Image (cartoon, rainbow, N blue to C red):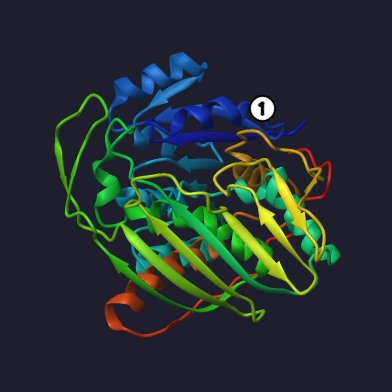
């Protein structure tokens, strides 16, 4: 069976789940990892049985590696993606695609000009939960989708993350950190976005870290930590999205609900791959729907597997840079609309990613 050789750049907190999952996909082979701290790369290579622990330049020079997974900090996403593409390799990057729209668009255009694939997280929309919702909508289970709500509200990451400072820098905040999960899921279900508006604020200009090893350290906040947005989709549906690091007590609001002409669909957490999926028709109680698709566990990396399959078959991949850029532009649009007091009309569009076939194995 043909396999696509994969290397990882960035051996930080998120890398472990990729290193655990990539070897499980039938078309992928994880052969190398790299980090600015070579000792950290060596430790990860030893822990996960990866053949090579490289410097970044060594990994980019390895002719066998076809896909590079970019797991660096957001501020480095664009620089590393562009280096990967210039080295003649396909690239898959953690969210967001880039910090700025200009850098994101440069990634899209460079990949296109070189005939390479670029894409990125989140790939949770390929999990069984959201794929089941996509199928239900396509089958008409809720009629015509007319509206949606989406909520991601928590107290911030300084209570659990070992190094949470970057969440409060430019390119961080709840919209850039968690918004990609929600917006990608909404686009996958409802199609591309036409325009957005929003309100954003920094509620607490200084944060105190309570997690180890930096407990007691102070963080100065440089990006909005509460963003409320309204989304007009090209299809006509309208959604409300709230992302916040300022909600200090738990809420009972759903992650995402889609409201249609014939029913309501409660979508599972878009930061996960499974269910539950709940359907409510007029006059009936909520009904839990059995998942129609697999990949319902923590299958981070499935977007890389889909890219690998696309390399081997010549078919389009789903977690594409066009989708990731469309989401990046929308996230900037909320902030820009808030600061300028207007609607932001999207310059980009993208197709709805093709649904996975039920029973598909990547």
Residue 139 is left or right of residue 132, and the answer is: right
Q: Determine crowd level at label 1: few under 14, some 14-19, many 20+ residues with C-alpha closer than 10 A.
A: some
Would residue 64 be seen by someone viewing this image from the given angle?
Answer: no
Residue at x 28%, y 28% (from the top left corner):
37
Q: Residue furthest front?
A: 283
Q: Quadrant of residue 218?
A: top left
Residue at x 46%, y 35% (from the top left corner):
8
**Picture quarter with the C terminus:** top right
> Residue 356: where, in percent of width, then height?
77, 51
Secondary structure at numbered mark 1: helix
Residue 225 is left or right of residue 114, and the answer is: left
Residue 359 is left or right of residue 176, and the answer is: right
Q: Is residue 202 above or below residue 40?
A: below
> Residue 59: where, in percent of width, then height?
42, 34
247 and 77: which one is in front?
Answer: 247
Q: How many marks?
A: 1
The residue wearing badge 1 is 24
Q: Is residue 219 above or below residue 37?
A: below
Residue at x 42%, y 66% (from the top left corner):
331
359 and 89: which one is in front?
Answer: 359
**Picture quarter with the N terminus:** top right
Would residue 91 be seen by someone viewing this image from the given angle?
Answer: yes
> Residue 333: where, in percent of width, then height?
40, 73
> Residue 235: where, in percent of width, then height?
67, 79
């Amino acid at each position: 069976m043909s396999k696509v050789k994969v290397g990882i750049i960035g051996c930080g907190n998120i890398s472990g789940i990729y290193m655990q999952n990539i070897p499980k996909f039938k078309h992928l082979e994880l052969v190398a990892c790299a980090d600015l701290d070579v000792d950290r790369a060596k430790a990860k290579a030893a822990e996960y049985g990866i053949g090579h622990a490289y410097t970044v330049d060594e990994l980019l020079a390895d002719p066998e590696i076809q896909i590079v997974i970019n797991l660096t900090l957001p501020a480095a996403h664009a620089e590393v993606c562009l280096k990967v593409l210039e080295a003649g390799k396909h690239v898959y990057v953690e969210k967001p695609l880039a910090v700025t729209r200009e850098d994101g668009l440069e990634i899209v255009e460079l990949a296109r000009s070189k005939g390479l694939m670029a894409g990125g997280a989140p790939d949770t929309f390929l999990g069984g939960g959201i794929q089941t919702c996509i199928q239900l909508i396509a089958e008409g289970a809720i009629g015509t989708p007319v509206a949606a709500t989406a909520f991601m509200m928590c107290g911030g990451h300084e209570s659990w993350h070992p190094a949470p400072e970057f969440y409060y820098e430019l390119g961080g905040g709840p919209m850039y950190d968690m918004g990609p999960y929600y917006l990608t899921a909404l686009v996958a279900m409802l199609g591309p976005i036409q325009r957005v508006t929003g309100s954003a604020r920094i509620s607490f200009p200084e944060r105190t870290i309570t997690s180890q090893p930096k407990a007691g350290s102070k963080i100065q906040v440089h990006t909005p930590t509460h963003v409320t947005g309204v989304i007009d989709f090209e299809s006509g549906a309208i959604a409300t999205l709230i992302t916040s690091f300022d909600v200090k007590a738990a809420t009972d609001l759903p992650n995402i609900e889609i409201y249609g002409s014939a029913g309501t669909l409660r979508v599972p957490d878009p930061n996960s791959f499974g269910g539950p999926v709940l359907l409510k028709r007029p006059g009936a109680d909520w009904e839990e729907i059995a998942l129609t698709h697999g990949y319902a566990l923590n299958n981070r990396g499935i977007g890389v597997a889909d890219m690998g399959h696309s390399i081997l078959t010549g078919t389009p991949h789903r977690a594409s840079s066009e989708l990731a850029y469309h989401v990046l532009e929308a996230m900037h649009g909320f902030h820009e609309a808030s600061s300028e007091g207007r609607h932001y009309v999207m310059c980009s569009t993208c197709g709805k990613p093709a649904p996975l076939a039920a029973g598909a194995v990547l």
